[in-house]
Image: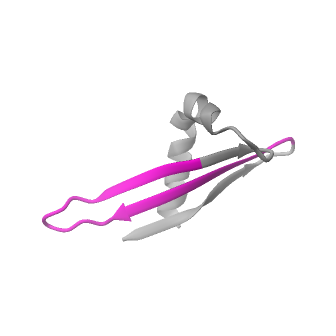
Amino acid sequence: MKHIRSSFIEQQETYTLEVYFDYHKEDGDWETPPSEELEIEKVELNGQDITDFYWDYLSDTMDLSILEYCRVQ
């Protein structure tokens, strides 16, 4: 089992995007298949909450980057 509760930070010259998340991964066994779950808790752009905007416009592309980040941790 792997559990990560952290934040993913994308920092550029003109902005900082911080995504707070909770990640769970179960390896599984012969009775239960492996599974993973990513829960986005809050998203901030330069310190301002943009969680709703994230769900509407960014989650499709950012969730994959965050999952890849979690898998290598």
Give the quadrant of the N terminus: bottom left
- For the point 65% across and 45% down, the residue is 43
Q: Position of residue 21 (x, y in %)?
A: 55, 55
Residue extending farthest to the right is 14
- For the point 86% across and 41% down, the residue is 14
Q: Tell me how many marks there are.
A: 0
Tell me how the rendering is colored. one colour
Q: Position of residue 9 (x, y in %)?
A: 69, 53
- Along the line of sight, the residue nearer the viewer: 28 or 49: 49
Q: Is residue 12 magenta?
A: no
- For the point 54% across and 37% down, the residue is 59
Residue extending farthest to the bottom is 1
In the image, is 9 to the left or to the right of 2? Answer: right
In the image, is 70 to the left or to the right of 34? Answer: right
Query: In this rendering, is residue 71 above or below 67?
Result: below
Dominant secondary structure, magenta:
strand
Looking at the rendering, the stretch of residues picked out in magenta corresponds to 14-41
Q: Position of residue 41 (x, y in %)?
A: 56, 50
Query: In this rendering, is residue 31 above or below 53?
Result: below
- For the point 50% across and 44% down, the residue is 64
Q: Is residue 30 magenta?
A: yes
Which corner quadrant of the image does residue 69 belong to? bottom right
Residue extending farthest to the left is 31
Q: Position of residue 29 (x, y in %)?
A: 19, 68
Query: In this rendering, is residue 61 above or below 29?
Result: above
